């Protein structure tokens, strides 16, 4: 669906907060069909971006911790 969204994690580094937010914004644009939301829809659009950004950040942190722990065990 969103093939052009940048991969946000590699084996050696995790994306910056700006990269995570931009990927969330791109995802919401794709899902809603808005390149730029109208004033009427701006609040809903921004809230969706905020929620997806937060969820993505949590997931990346947890995955990174798990990978670090696995590397330590080896």
Image (cartoon, helix red, strand yellow):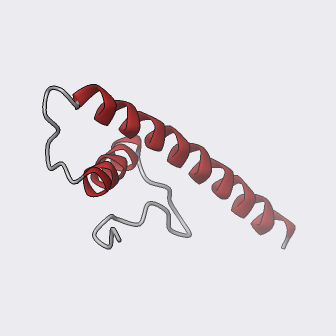
Residue depicted at x 30% and y 46%: 25
Q: To which quarter of the image does residue 5 belong?
A: bottom left
Pick the quarter of the image with the C terminus.
Answer: bottom right
Residue depicted at x 51% and y 48%: 56
Q: Position of residue 19 (x, y in %)?
A: 34, 49
User: Is residue 50 left or right of 38 when viewed as pictured?
Assistant: right
Q: Position of residue 26 (x, y in %)?
A: 28, 53
Pick the quarter of the image with the N terminus.
Answer: bottom left
Residue depicted at x 50% and y 60%: 13
User: Is residue 54 left or right of 7 when viewed as pictured?
Assistant: right
Q: Position of residue 69 (x, y in %)?
A: 79, 59
- Vertical order, 66 against 61 (above or below): below
Residue 52 versus residue 13: which sits nearer the camera? 52
Q: To which quarter of the image does residue 67 belong?
A: bottom right
User: Is residue 74 left or right of 44 when viewed as pictured?
Assistant: right
Residue depicted at x 60% and y 51%: 59
């Amino acid at each position: 669906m969103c093939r052009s969204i940048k991969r946000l994690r590699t084996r050696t580094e995790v994306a910056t907060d700006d990269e995570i937010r931009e990927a969330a914004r791109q995802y919401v644009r794709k899902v809603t069909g808005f390149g730029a939301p109208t004033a009427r829809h701006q609040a809903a659009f921004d809230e969706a971006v905020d929620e997806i950004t937060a969820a993505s950040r949590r997931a990346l942190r947890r995955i990174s911790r798990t990978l670090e722990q696995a590397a330590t065990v080896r």
